[in-house]
Amino acid sequence: MTTTARSHADAPRVAAPNPHDFLGIDALLSDDERLIRDTVRAFVRERVLPQIGEWFEHHTFPRTMAKELGDLGLLGMHLQGYGCAGTSAVAYGLACLELEAGDSGFRSFVSVQGSLAMFAISAHGSEEQKQTWLPRLAAGDAIGCFGLTEPDFGSDPGGMRTSARRDGGDYVLNGTKTWITNGGIADVAIVWARADPDDGPRSGSIRGFVVPTDTRGFSTRNIERKLSLRASVTSELILDEVRVPASAMLPGAEGLRGPLSCLNEARYGIVWGSLGAARACYESALAYARTREQFGKRIAAFQITQEKLVAMMLEINKGLLTALHIGRLKDRGEAHPAHVSFGKLNNVREALAICREARTILGASGITLDYPVIRHANNLESVLTYEGTSEIHTLILGQAITGESAF
């Protein structure tokens, strides 16, 4: 009997999978993408990880880091012109992945600066607004925030009460925004408000305004006693008769389409970033299991521990393939907002489960800041909710597959 099949003995030897890149996803990236990823990874290792436990414990975000992030070209890196790096969506995603492997607070800072404040100006602003703010924000010489959420209107921003009353050549803003990342350290705020009902054909429409935070009547109050995202500034914005010129209005954004387009950009960064937190917890649990001994052997040799580690590895690799595919779609201009909702819903949910499971492998050590696990798990409780809750993204996907709105 003859056969054309090669025997196992004749087959070429294939390298064993890398436990830190099981499917070899690294090979799917370009040289430039790998260079950006490795540069951000080195920055996180050298500048973030040595102090992040202390910053988290003391509820501090070091404002000076804005300039360092700007010097690396990470602020608005996926935008074009005005001092922005103009990288691909995939490269931006990889940067978010590495930043969140350090801490969600750092990825949040970069997301809010670039994908919310800067994107709003880049996509919807006037040339004067772009020239005034984008170069400073890209360099980290100024910090931006994005004022959309209100105390009574989170998932339903269309109900916002913040108002913009026309008064001659000015607008006067009144209202309160809450859960605003960077609010207490920002130099400029993108504030969304309902235009004056008497303001002509655009009456009652939601409009965006570029508001310097030193404007009279503008104040902030930081939200304290957080047990999540502690290495991040979260604030209320209080607008009390804040007068800005009509030129402060974003001319290209009217209605909810404007702020939602910005949120979609920020959500995309989370698709990648959440996996950075998951990877950090998986790697911590894997290293711990390889050294911790119980009953006379390393706990990595126990079946239940292996099952937990394998489940983590599977979901991280699946999540990375999802993120990469959505990123490639985005770079081709083919990503629908529902694609981003798919990635955000799945990857954050799985990342949080990974962090919780990693905690069980570390036992009591897993609740200390000597390891990254409980910090990432706490942070992801916020990431699960912001930029659209899991329930909201579920309804977005439900509408996409059924054609029926459940909102």
Image (cartoon, grey):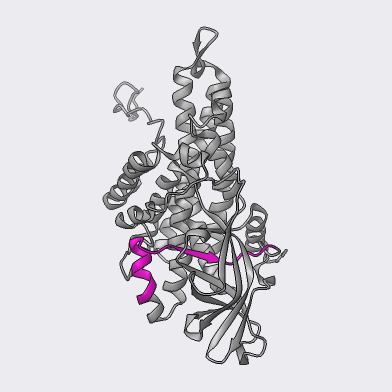
345 or 145: which is nearer to us? 145
Kindly tell me whether residue 317 is visible in this rendering.
no
Extreme residue in the right direction: 406
Q: Position of residue 205 (x, y in %)?
A: 62, 81
Q: Is residue 184 above or below residue 224?
A: below
Q: Position of residue 95 (x, y in %)?
A: 38, 51
Residue stretch in magenta: 131-151
Q: Is residue 312 left or right of residue 193?
A: left
Q: Assign the C terminus to one quadrant of the image.
A: bottom right
38 or 105: which is nearer to us? 105
Q: Residue at x 47, y 63 (%)?
A: 186
Q: Assign the N terminus to one quadrant of the image.
A: top left
Q: Is residue 105 above or below residue 163?
A: above
Q: Residue at x 41, y 72 (%)?
A: 122
Q: Position of residue 193 (x, y in %)?
A: 61, 75
Tell me if residue 145 is in the magenta stretch: yes
Q: Residue at x 54, y 41 (%)?
A: 351
Tell me if residue 194 is in the magenta stretch: no
Extreme residue in the front direction: 216
How many marks can you see? 0
Q: Is residue 322 above or below residue 196?
A: above
Q: Position of residue 166 (x, y in %)?
A: 60, 87
Q: Residue at x 30, y 56 (%)?
A: 71
135 or 32: which is nearer to us? 135
Q: Is residue 96 left or right of residue 239?
A: left
Kindly tell me whether residue 238 is visible in this rendering.
yes
Q: Is residue 277 above or below residue 172?
A: above
